Image: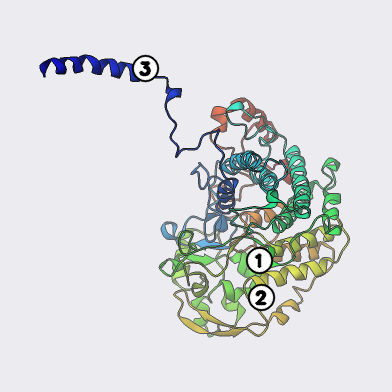
Amino acid sequence: MKRYFKKLLVILPILVATTSCQNYDQLLPNPNVASESNTIPPEYLLGRITYDMYAGGGVVDGRPGNVSEQPFDQAHRWNQFIVSNNLYYGGKNTYDWSVTATPYGMLKNAIKMEEQALKTLGTKTNAYAAVAKFVRAYTAVWLTQRLGDVPMSEAGQGLENLTPKYDAQKDVYISALQLLEDANADFTSLIANSTQASILAGDILLGNDIKKWQKAVNTYKLRVLISLSKRADDTPELGIKQKFADIVNNPTKYPVMGSNADNMVFTFNSAYNTYPHTPKDGNNNYQNIGSAYLKLTTVNADPRTFIVATPAPAELAKGKTVSDFSAYVGSDISDAVADLFTNSTAGKYSFTNFNRYYGSVVGPEPYIIMGYSEMNFNIAEGINRGWATGDAAAYYTKGINASLAFYGLSEGATLTIGDLTGKTLGNVNVSIANFLTNPNVVYKGNNTTGLEQILNQKYISFFQNSGWEAFYNQRRTGYPKTFITVGSGINSVGKVPLRWLYPVDESTYNPENYTKALTQFGGKDDIYAPMWLLK
């Protein structure tokens, strides 16, 4: 026995030495971990991409500078739909952003989705690739709107290029618009020749419907084109007006959203993705409705006032009724939080409609990423500016009606009005007719007044949806005028910034191109410097 034990002691080191010297490449790979050579179902990547579109760039990845775009969160405080009166429970109002996050997670997953779809389906023209073209355009525009010049032509190459060049903002838009054109053409082909390549799965925004995706592509293109309004007359290579007119005047080639049923939406559920407010959330008294919103709705007897807000208790104490629009008072985001808290406690401001927005874990409505109402206002704006022929008043009215329908408002409907805890205060009867015939609402024609009306109604329709579009539209046009851009409570400078700083990693890992990009702002990464888009 002793002899065998001694032999074992000699053999064991040999075995250890032999196995420890084995080449790593000879070891069996973990079958549960995907590698570059694996084929991954593209629908897995599409599910992640579409969720990221709802959450916002960098949110899922936890990147520096990320901001949630979901309802009742920071993006919508900066859109001035809600105003915090308590830093701890309500969040901050100050426009103190610095570096931006990026939508790079969406971009790299879109690239991989294209690759995997090609492996799976054997053709480059497939539904996943068409969606990927949209996502490439979407992510580029998402980032350039925040910064100015950004990497696009060399973005997403991974280890092959860790220092991508920055494309001029104009070139970013040229490339994005071409991607959208190509995506539309691909969808046209896929819809006309239905095959396995035409089928989507994993899409949580449009129900795997490629016809809706094609409408979304062209509706988004209208959004991008209208965002370029300041460049419409001095950048012929973009063809802004012609591209806009082509979509409006040729719905066969460029189908767009036809109703709220075509909205690109994120739908909440009780299992995983609950609504930001639930019946267990007791913080309604720490958030008021912003004055930028309520000043627009109350002056025009807009029934969306009752959907969104509660009457201010101090106004009811004066003898006003719940149906009196003047009883609904928004708070000023430029005021100091301490003053906002004092005035809120005194009942001077309206709070969020508790019964509607805290009533269930799935919420009262889905979150619109891009919608039919906005599209109509974008078309109305383009016609108002002379970019296309058509009836701007008709599109303007359709935009309003689509927004009203989204909230389930109908003529003569009875709404129950509650206080900030949901306690019933009374009822109101909805009069859409009185609202639409209000002299301030009736369209005043294709002039500056009409343009202001369109933009005011577009802002109202963005309440708690569509990411940063409310802010971007105001930044571009100056409307609505109720949007507060200066004041001591805005930040230490007292004014709303125009852009974000470049991502923190850029100055460290891509310093040469980062430094070149700053020449557009005189060599300084300045959040108050206007980018090409805004000049």
Residue 405 rendering spot, x and y as whole percentages = 67, 73
Amino acid identity at mark 1: Ile
Is disc 3 placed on a helix, strand or loop? loop
Q: Disc 3 versus disc 1: distance between alpha carbons?
A: 68 Å
Dot placed on the residue nearer the N-terminal end, 2 or 1: 2
Observer able to see residue 116: yes
Q: In this image, 250 relative to 96: left or right?
A: right
Tags 3 and 2 in contact by the CB under 8 Å rule? Answer: no
Q: Quadrant of the C terminus?
A: top right
Residue 253 lies in quadrant: bottom right
Answer whether residue 489 is visible to the viewer in this image. no
Q: Quadrant of the N terminus?
A: top left
Residue indicated by mark 1:
460
User: For the point 66% across and 37% down, which residue is it?
Assistant: 150
Q: Which residue is mark 3?
A: 21
CB under 8 Å between discs 2 and 1: yes
**Amino acid type at mark 3:** Cys
Mark number displayed over residue 302: 2
Q: In the rendered image, which quarter is residue 103 located in? A: top right
Residue 479 is tagged as none
Q: Circle 2 — which element?
A: loop
**Callout count:** 3
Front-lying residue, 236 or 310: 236
Q: Nearer the viewer, residue 95 or 436?
A: 436
